[in-house]
């Protein structure tokens, strides 16, 4: 931050409330916790002065700061780099993946594109480390002008500061779109009262000031301190003393800018050129400015004149007295003068040390198309993407396209920019660029690529709707031109059709599959995408029994890719395993071993590599497995982590597994509220598949509660469409509900479908569920053996939830045959399992059956473990498994000091005093007794 000039209280009259808020934030950091504050307000309202106040009050602190600059918004992580530059000596203290991610993001080393989330974790560690010896104040001015990567990383850090002795304060304009900072503690900086405005104006004007003129300035300034200080500069001394003055009806910001412009114009030509060059150079590098000034023939004494005007200071760095001054100097200069300044800065910038900034200056200096400049920008786009800056890469390419003389090459660059905009989630900008590309000369391949990008853009916004049709059309257009890209697009179209499901407004899954089978053949050897496409095509066209071998090959391909640690371009195809369904290919094959290996492996690889675009999917994938394994608490912590990551990255949380978990927990009002909310949201997005999942979850809920009419209706709806991943499970729910409601034909038809799938899969899980369902519909002689067979199969699996249900069904059957002692054995086992798991609906059903069998059973109650928050439970589990605070912090994206703080709460709630007691405390079953 700039050092406060003169009296630090000037401009702060009437700001007692704001100063108190800043003092509290600093006090919290001094006490060992952390504080975040966002100051919002109109330009000139005093936000910068308040940051200077915070810097002045931060005695005993280490202080770092940065001010966003509008012209630098295109450079990836530029503002973050400036903020962290004083701390980079501590970079080697970070864990390897974090250190490498931050180094690549800052251009300190070459490497694969780092994920923004991992960069955020590195910055969090860097700030926490810097605050170990003394508290740290981070002051960020004009946050609305930070580049996208910087603001997202700082927002991530702000949401995770808890106990690091860090005070992080942002200042930004009130009306700007700043979704990244939404939800953080904030304070709106209001207009000054009339009394304080008069006092400030009187203290700032040295010349005689007529009371009427004073009152008019106060009225027109609307309590804006910058206006109160700058508007008098528009008036001659005679006007201030009481002469005639015509009120100016222009917007206040424009008039402040005009006041700065008048000061600017009062300088000599050399002074104006120097000031403009300084305004065009966002880093404040004095040496670079001197070189650029020398190239323009600007004498060194021009700096003194610019400083004496009160607009700028030339010290170790160039510091404008207010961000509005820099903006006004740059905007009011003529276009030729701005280009001249950038031309000199480009020439003065070392092309080896800072090629991107040189390319950026060259682009701003160009007045007409220039292929050499466009090529430099294209290279900068590649480097930006390599540092994880998709939005910056798009910006470089957009400007490169504007400067490209050749029409065909221009379109190619525009299409590349569209892809980067889609990756950055910038739908509106991508739409605009597509329109630009359409206006240019397009070859057949370029037209096909454009249509594919348009389809992918639609799919990124609305999973169903027109996306399947648009992707299929693009694939057909690509087929004769680029076979590999056509097959990629066919796989995307398959995924879109699966998502659309029963709400499809275009080609159904079968239509896409038939097109894929008739389309370009797979190369030799096939890529992962080819094996996946062929496997999905076979399943959809040939049916489950015939398609299972191809599906298994696809699953094996996914596992091979995962073992190879794929996280780059080819890793995007893992979405078919992780995103199309939270119950992916392994679930379709009832393969719990493969599911377990894929789930735990995917999470581990994503964490280690920082592949955080994949991590929420992988966490959701593992969470769903944990539900079926009967590990509900672990599943819930994984879901919470996935949600936190998705929200921090600006994505939509995946609530699919939450539906299933809520249904198995058996709390009707909460489960149905979530099911209703998700169903409404996915209907609007055209995701028909999730409606089927919601029906399946509803069927589970009401079968558990013993309300079979409602379960039957939901299961019937779920089974109307063969949704990938959970259709077999829905058939099992339909069989039980139909049997309980006396609809044998419906139950038998569902059993036939389940049998086909289970026998084709041939796993212990599949055969166990099928045997249990068949037992429900069999006569007494066959049923007993089938139930035992089911329990035997499921006893060899990881799916404890389904084993407990099989024992419940068998116990109910035994009780109805008046075999009470045997029934109590099975029902007790089911009740104990469901209670321990947390499947309260099914536990209550088992309890009622036990009571009917002559057993007295008391309801279980929650223990101390249930008092832990989700994050505390995660930390306790990891600490109990022997992980250090640093390892836990890396996994959960919090600082080690925050881990220690949470562990203190965990110890108090669980009544333990050390980590070695955590595992036993967490594994203690819910207290409750059973009396004979």
Image: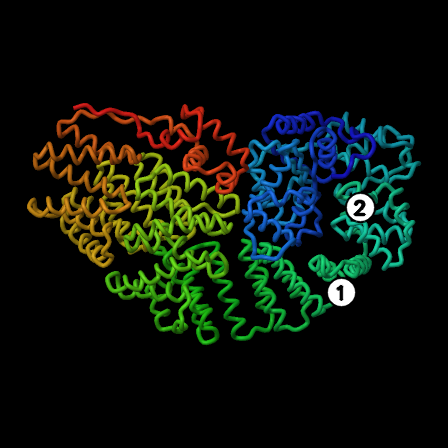
Residue 906, x across and y down, in percent? 44, 28
Q: Which residue is mark 1?
A: 367
Image quarter hosting the N terminus: top right
Q: CA distance from mark 1 to mark 2?
A: 27 Å
Q: Which is more toward the observer, 812 or 322?
A: 812
Residue 237 occupies which quadrant of the picture?
top right
Q: Nearer the viewer, mark 1 or mark 2?
A: 2
Dot 1: within a 10 Å radius of its alpha carbon, few (fewer than 14), some, or many (20 or more) residues? few
Q: Is residue 735 visible?
A: yes
Identified at 74% across, 67% down, the residue is: 368
Residue 797, x across and y down, in percent? 26, 47
Residue 708, x across and y down, in percent? 21, 40
Dot 2: within a 10 Å radius of its alpha carbon, few (fewer than 14), some, or many (20 or more) residues? many
Mark 1 falls on what kind of element?
loop
Q: Which residue is mark 2?
A: 318
Lateral position of residue 335 relative to residue 626, left or right: right
């Amino acid at each position: 931050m700039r050092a406060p000039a003169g009296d630090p209280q000037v401009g702060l009259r009437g700001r007692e409330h704001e100063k108190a808020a800043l003092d509290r934030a600093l006090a919290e950091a001094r006490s060992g916790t952390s504080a975040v504050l966002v100051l919002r307000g109109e330009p000139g309202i005093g936000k910068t002065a308040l940051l200077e106040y915070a810097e002045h009050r931060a005695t005993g602190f280490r202080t770092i700061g940065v001010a966003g600059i509008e012209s630098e918004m295109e450079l990836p992580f530029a503002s973050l780099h400036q903020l962290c530059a004083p701390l980079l000596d501590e970079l080697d203290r970070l864990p390897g993946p974090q250190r490498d991610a931050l180094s690549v993001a800052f251009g300190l080393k070459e490497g694969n594109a780092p994920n923004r989330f991992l960069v955020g974790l590195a910055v969090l560690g860097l700030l926490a480390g810097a605050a170990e010896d003394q508290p740290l104040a981070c002051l960020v001015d004009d946050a609305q002008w930070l580049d996208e990567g910087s603001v997202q990383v700082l927002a991530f850090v702000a949401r995770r500061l808890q106990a690091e002795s860090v005070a992080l304060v942002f200042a930004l304009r009130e009306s700007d779109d700043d979704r990244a900072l939404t939800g953080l503690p904030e304070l709106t900086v209001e207009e000054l009262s009339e009394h304080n405005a008069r006092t400030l104006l009187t203290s700032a004007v040295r010349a005689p000031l007529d009371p009427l003129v004073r009152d008019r300035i106060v009225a027109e300034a609307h309590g804006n301190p910058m206006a109160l200080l700058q508007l008098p500069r528009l008036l001659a001394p005679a006007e201030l003393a009481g002469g005639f003055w015509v009120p100016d009806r222009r917007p206040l910001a424009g008039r402040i800018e005009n006041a700065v412009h008048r000061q600017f114009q009062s300088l000599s030509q050399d002074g104006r050129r120097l000031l403009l060059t300084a305004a065009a150079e966002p880093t404040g590098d004095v040496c670079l400015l001197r070189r650029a000034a020398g190239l323009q023939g600007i004498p060194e004494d021009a700096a003194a004149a610019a400083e004496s005007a009160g607009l700028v200071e030339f010290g170790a760095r160039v510091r404008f007295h207010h961000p509005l001054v820099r903006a006004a100097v740059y905007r009011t200069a003529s276009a030729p003068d701005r280009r001249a300044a950038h031309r000199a800065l480009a020439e003065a910038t070392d092309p080896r040390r800072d090629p991107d900034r040189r390319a950026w200056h060259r682009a701003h200096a160009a007045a007409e198309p220039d292929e050499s400049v466009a090529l430099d920008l294209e290279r900068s786009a590649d480097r930006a993407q390599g540092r994880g800056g998709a939005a910056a890469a798009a910006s470089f390419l957009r400007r490169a396209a504007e400067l490209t003389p050749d029409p065909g090459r221009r379109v190619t660059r525009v299409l590349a920019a569209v892809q980067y905009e889609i990756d950055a989630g910038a739908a509106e900008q991508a739409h605009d660029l597509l329109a630009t590309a359409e206006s240019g000369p397009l070859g057949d391949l370029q037209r096909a690529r454009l249509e594919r990008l348009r389809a992918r853009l639609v799919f990124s916004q609305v999973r169903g709707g027109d996306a399947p049709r648009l992707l299929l059309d693009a694939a057909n257009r690509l087929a004769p031109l680029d076979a590999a890209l056509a097959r990629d697009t066919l796989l995307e179209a398959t995924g879109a059709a699966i998502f659309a499901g029963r709400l499809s407004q275009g080609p159904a899954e079968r239509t896409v599959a038939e097109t894929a089978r008739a389309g370009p053949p797979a190369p030799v050897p096939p890529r992962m995408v080819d094996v996946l496409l062929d496997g999905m095509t076979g399943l959809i066209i040939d049916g489950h029994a015939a398609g299972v071998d191809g599906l298994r090959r696809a699953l094996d391909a996914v596992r091979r890719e995962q073992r190879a640690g794929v996280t780059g371009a080819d890793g995007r195809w893992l979405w078919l395993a992780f995103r199309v369904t939270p119950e992916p290919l392994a679930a379709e094959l009832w393969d719990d071993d493969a599911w377990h290996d894929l789930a735990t492996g995917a999470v581990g690889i994503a964490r280690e590599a920082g592949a955080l675009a994949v991590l929420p999917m992988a966490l959701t994938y593992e969470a769903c497995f944990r539900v079926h394994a009967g590990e509900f608490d672990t599943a819930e912590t994984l879901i919470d982590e996935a949600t936190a990551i998705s929200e921090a990255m600006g994505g939509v949380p995946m609530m699919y597994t939450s539906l299933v978990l809520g249904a198995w927990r058996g709390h009707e009002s909460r489960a149905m509220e979530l099911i209703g909310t998700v169903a409404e949201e996915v209907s609007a997005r055209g995701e028909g598949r999730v409606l089927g999942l919601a029906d399946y979850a509803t069927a589970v809920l009401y079968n558990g509660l013993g309300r079979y009419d409602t379960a039957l209706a939901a299961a019937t709806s779920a089974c109307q469409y063969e949704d990938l991943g959970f259709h077999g499970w829905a058939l099992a729910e339909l069989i039980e509900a139909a049997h309980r409601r006396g609809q044998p034909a419906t139950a038998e038809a569902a059993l036939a479908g389940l049998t086909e799938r289970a026998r084709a899969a041939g796993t212990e899980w599949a055969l166990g569920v099928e045997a249990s369902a068949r037992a429900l519909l069999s006569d007494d002689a066959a049923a007993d053996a089938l139930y035992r067979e089911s329990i035997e199969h499921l006893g060899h699996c990881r799916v404890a939830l389904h084993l407990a249900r099989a024992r419940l069904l068998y116990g109910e059957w035994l009780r109805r045959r008046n075999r009470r002692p045997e029934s109590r054995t099975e029902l007790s086992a089911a009740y104990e399992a469901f209670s321990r798991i947390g499947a309260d609906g099914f536990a209550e059903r088992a309890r009622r059956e036990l009571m009917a069998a002559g057993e007295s059973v008391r309801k279980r109650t929650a223990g101390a473990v249930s008092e832990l928050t989700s994050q505390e439970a995660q930390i306790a589990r990891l600490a109990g498994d022997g992980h250090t605070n640093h390892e836990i912090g890396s996994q959960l994206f919090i600082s080690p000091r925050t881990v220690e703080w949470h562990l203190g709460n965990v110890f108090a709630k669980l009544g333990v005093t050390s980590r070695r007691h955590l595992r036993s405390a967490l594994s203690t079953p819910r207290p409750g007794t059973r009396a004979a």
